[in-house]
Image: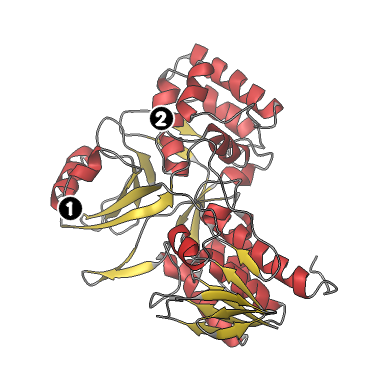
Amino acid sequence: MRVAVIGGGWSGIAAAVELTAAGVDTTLFEAGRILGGRARSVQLEGRELDNGQHILLGAYRDTLALMRRVGADPDLLLDRRPLQVVDNAGFRLSLPRLPAPLNVAWSLLAAHGVGLGEKLRTAWWMECVKRRGFRLPHDITVAEWLDAAGQTGVLRNRLWNPLCLAALNTPVERASAQLFANVLRDSLGSSHREDTDLLLPRVPLGQLLPEPAGRWLTAHGATIRLRHRVRSLASEADTLRVDGTSFDAAVLAVAPQHAAALWPDTPVPQDFEPIATVYLQYPPDTQLSFPLRSLSGGLGQWVVDRGNGLLACILSGHGDWEMYDDAALSRVLDRELQIDAPLLGASVIREKRATFSATPGLHRPDPQSGRLQIAGDYSWSDYPATLEGAIRSGLRAANATLDYHLPNRPRQT
């Protein structure tokens, strides 16, 4: 059986590894010069940087399992810490190493800068949300959901708003409350304490998965065709033709706009959110008290300490920051960080279509059936645009392909 995987992002990588491990003759097509898609390493001004700052959680089980499968050790490559939400205005919420849900309850009660009454109301609201299985009667915006719950105080501004923007890349005024509830279900609402852990890359993104996966695929007989943008995908008799070459099946794992161009019947999101990552270089001994900090009161949203004095500021979703050019944006963020050290340099990476807009009632494509399967973070309807959603969609597409063509295959346990 020959299968084409179109798109070498994290979903395409997951599909290709799963298919190859099952003994399938797999060809992975990628338009770029390296694997990784929107989560890859790039060379910029003589240094290796990520094309966007990604943060992982302990709940990303399929991502961590895939890393191990291709020989990338998460314990070495990721810095695992109990989650803290710390901002530049004195707010701090720290999850202790206690069993869930005690860790979340304790962190709320011990949060700095919040009155006891608000803490208790929030704890009760979260318990009610949990009892309802994190399901809303109907999808509304996060802002409407928080308003209805009376979440209008300090925690609204210092916890829920920043977490929503970080997770959905969409401001609370436009973000889907159901998708945000799903994120809370698998993180703060999880019964496993380790699911709430923060996983920060110690290395560039390419070393987490794309590079080791590429080596694993090559070693196991897969074909990787870089710098090959697929121009045509057509069904013909009992095959699919990819740029004129026949395959028994295909996994379409490209960005939504490219998927719609190759397979017009695919319903895809129409609205997208930009993300800018502003890398600010300070002297090597510069470091944050905790490697992830929320920024409030200005343009900044989140900043990640990448070590050796390199701070990555993340700006997600449409906003005022888009009006600034790179130099001005770097100056503003330098002022907002208030680092007691000179700024030595700055680099800015902007992605105009970084993620789909995670709005209420968003229509997500079916995985398809038979010879063509759809993969990509936008096709995993339970999550916003996340690495875990991308990985899960790729695994689902690969297994659906195998089930269709090899229904009697032995299953892994």
Q: Is residue 250 above or below residue 390?
A: below
* Residue toward you, 65 or 82: 65
Instruction: Point out residue 348 in the picture as x, y percentages from the top left corner.
Output: 24, 56
Q: Is residue 400 above or below residue 337?
A: below
Q: Which residue is mark 2?
A: 173
Q: Which mark is residue 326?
A: 1
Instruction: Point out residue 264 in the picture as x, y percentages from the top left corner.
Output: 51, 62
Secondary element at tag 1 = helix
Question: Residue shown at 40%/66% (left/top)?
Answer: 204
Pick whichever of labels 1 and 2 is earlier in the sequence.
Answer: 2
Amino acid tagged 1: Asp
Residue 21: quarter of image: bottom right
Q: Is residue 150 rendered to the left or right of residue 98?
A: left
Let me know if residue 379 appears in the view.
yes
Q: Is residue 39 rendered to the left or right of residue 148?
A: left
Instruction: Point out residue 144 in the picture as x, y percentages from the top left corner.
Output: 48, 23
* Residue toward you, 153 or 21: 21
Q: Dot 1: few (<14), some (14–19), or many (≥20) neighbours within 10 Å?
A: some
Disc 1/disc 2 C-alpha distance (Å): 26 Å
Amino acid tagged 2: Glu
Instruction: Point out residue 253 in the picture as x, y percentages from the top left corner.
Output: 53, 66
Labelled pair 1, 2 in contact (Cβ < 8 Å): no
Secondary element at tag 2 = loop
Question: Residue shown at 85%/73% (left/top)?
Answer: 408
Give the mark count. Answer: 2
